[in-house]
Structure formats: C-alpha cells, structure tokens
C-alpha cells in the first residue's frame, strides 16, 4: 500500500505539473487563432482589390468575388488613361512630397529648440504649439477657406501644401521633442568644448541620433497627406489639381458600375503607400518603439 500511495502521489504531481503547460499551450493556440482570423479579415479586401484590378472586364462581371481567376492589365490601363490617374498621381506627389519635407524640417528644428535650447517662455510656447493637437480641423476649415481666398492662395498647390503643413506641425514638433529630450547632455557639451557652433551641434551631432524618429514621422506624415481627402476637396475646388483620393471619388461618381477600373484606381492609390512602408519598415518600427519608450 505504501508503494501504491507513492506511485499515485507521483502521478498526481506529474499531472498537476503538466496542467500549467496545457493551459499555456491552449492560450497560445487561441491567440494564434484570433490573429489568423484578424489577418484574413484584414487582407481579404486588399486581395479582392488586387484580384479585381488584374482580371479581365468580362471575368469581373461574371465572377466579381473570384480571386485571380484571370490575368489582364486592361483595367489598369483604362484607369491610367481614361480615368486620368496618371495626372492624379502627379498631383498627389506635388501635394504630398513638399508638405512632408517641410513638416520634417520644421518639426526637427522646433523639437530641438524646445528640448535643448533654453529661452524665455519655452514651456508656455510649447504648450501653445501642442494645443494644435486638441483643435479639430473642422472648427476652422471654413474660415481658412476665406482666408486663403483673400490671400490669392485658394485653388493653388502652394495654398493646399500650406494647409497640409499646418495640420501636421503640432504633432511633428511634439514627436521630435521627445527624441531630442532623451539624448544625453554630455554630447552637446563635448561638442561645445570642441568649439562647435549651435548650428553644427544640431546638424551634425544631434540630428543623426534621431534619424529613426524623423523617418517614422516622415512616413506618418506622408501617409496622412497622401490619404487626405478633405483638404484637396475644399481648397482645390476648380479641379485643376486633383490628387488620387479626390480623383478616385470623381471616378466613382462617373463609373459607379465599372468595378474593374475602379479597383485598378484603388490599386494605383495604395501601391506608393505600401512601397514606402516596406522600404522604411525598420526605421518606422524603431522610431515608434523608441517614441513609446520615451513617452
């Protein structure tokens, strides 16, 4: 009986030791299942758009939900020529690239100034800048329309770029200040001892150390401006300049039943965004993770 009791006790302890492992394995399985379901739900619309854009028009009409049942560039060519997406792409670049570059430059300089340069009223001015994050664009978009018209900037690329720049500067300054604040003071002190000017310290010592943050801000700003629909619609009313978002809206209104070219236009719109994110994926991940740790 003693040996039997010992054996039962050992088996019981083994079962109890295995139970946490079973619970852990079950938890991992449930989490992986949820992630797989979320991935399928997220990727299916994208795959459907790509498949529809690359199918023949007859196949789109006969089997709209079939994935990659045929292959043709006819829809893409139709969107590029008949839908004028070639011009829309150029207008999107003219609106997005300059505004993104200006936001990165000004935000980096302002973030450095608020983080490293002591001057009277620095904290109060910084809070005024951050206050821009709390003011919705919808509250001042109509007065801004009349202001741009009075300045002769309505329906111009310069005016639309200025609006896009102004709507991103508050976040950009706040974002870059967090990176500069985390850098050790010994770096700039050593540079000053070596006789470096403030401009050289900023450009050659401090800025290279926050390159991951600048890259993350660049991607975020580019995506925000590229996908912006309201600003071009309001401040470019004549239709002389139409980015891809506004062009896709017009294309939808005129060709509501032409699903193939519409999917091709959507594909043309999202390809640059995907390409930029793939190229700068590592910098974006490092930048946002570093920003989260600093925050």
Image (cartoon, rainbow, N blue to C red):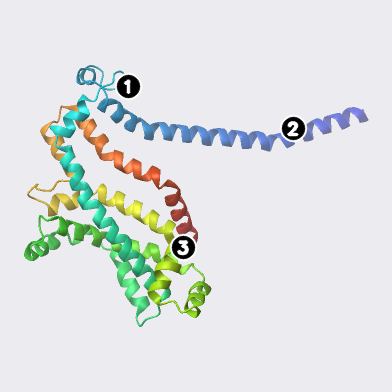
Residue 196 visible in image: yes
Counting from the top left corner in percent of width and height, residue 128 is at: 30, 72
Residue visible at 20% across and 17% down in the picture: 58
Q: For label 3, count other residues whose C-alpha is less than 10 Å away and answer few (under 14), some (14-19) or many (20+).
A: few
Nearer the viewer's eye, disc 2 or disc 1?
A: 1
**Residue tagged 1:** 68
**Distance in Å between CA atoms under marks 2 and 1:** 50 Å
Give the secondary structure at mark 1. loop
Residue visible at 40% across and 48% down in the picture: 280
Give the secondary structure at mark 3. helix
In the image: residue 20, left or right of residue 172? right
Residue visible at 14% across and 36% down in the picture: 251
Callout 2–callout 3 Cβ contact below 8 Å? no
**Distance in Å between CA atoms under marks 1 and 3:** 46 Å
Nearer the viewer's eye, disc 1 or disc 3?
A: 3
| Residue 10, quarter of picture | top right
Callout 1–callout 3 Cβ contact below 8 Å? no
Dot placed on the residue nearer the N-terminal end, 1 or 3: 1
**Residue tagged 2:** 15
| Residue 207, quarter of picture | bottom left
Nearer the viewer's eye, disc 2 or disc 3?
A: 3
Counting from the top left corner in percent of width and height, residue 26 is at: 59, 33
**Distance in Å between CA atoms under marks 2 and 3:** 53 Å
**Residue tagged 3:** 209
């Amino acid at each position: 009986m003693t040996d039997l009791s010992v054996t039962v006790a050992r088996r019981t302890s083994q079962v109890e030791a295995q139970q946490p492992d079973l619970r852990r394995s079950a938890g991992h399985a449930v989490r992986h299942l949820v992630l797989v379901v979320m991935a399928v739900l997220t990727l299916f619309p994208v795959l459907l758009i790509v498949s529809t854009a690359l199918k023949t028009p007859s196949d789109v009409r006969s089997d709209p939900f079939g994935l990659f049942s045929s292959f043709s560039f006819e829809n893409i060519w139709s969107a590029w020529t008949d839908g004028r997406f070639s011009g829309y792409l150029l207008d999107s670049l003219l609106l997005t690239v300059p505004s993104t570059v200006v936001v990165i430059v000004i935000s980096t300089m302002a973030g450095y100034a608020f983080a490293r340069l002591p001057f009277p009223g620095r904290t109060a001015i910084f809070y005024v800048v951050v206050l821009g994050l709390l003011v919705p664009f919808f509250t001042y978009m109509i007065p801004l329309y009349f202001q741009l018209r009075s300045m002769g900037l309505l329906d111009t690329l310069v005016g639309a770029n200025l609006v896009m720049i102004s709507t991103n500067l508050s976040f950009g300054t706040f974002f870059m200040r967090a990176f500069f604040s985390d850098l050790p003071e010994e770096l700039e002190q050593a540079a000053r001892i070596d006789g470096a000017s403030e401009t050289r310290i900023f450009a050659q010592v401090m800025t290279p150390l926050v390159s991951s943050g600048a890259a993350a801000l660049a991607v975020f700003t580019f995506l925000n401006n590229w996908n912006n629909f309201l600003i071009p619609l309001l401040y470019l009313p004549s239709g002389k300049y139409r980015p891809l978002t506004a062009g896709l809206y017009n294309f939808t209104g005129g060709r509501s039943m032409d699903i193939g070219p519409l999917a091709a236009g959507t594909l043309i719109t999202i390809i640059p965004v995907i390409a930029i994110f793939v190229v700068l994926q590592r910098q974006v991940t490092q930048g946002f993770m570093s920003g989260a740790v600093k925050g």
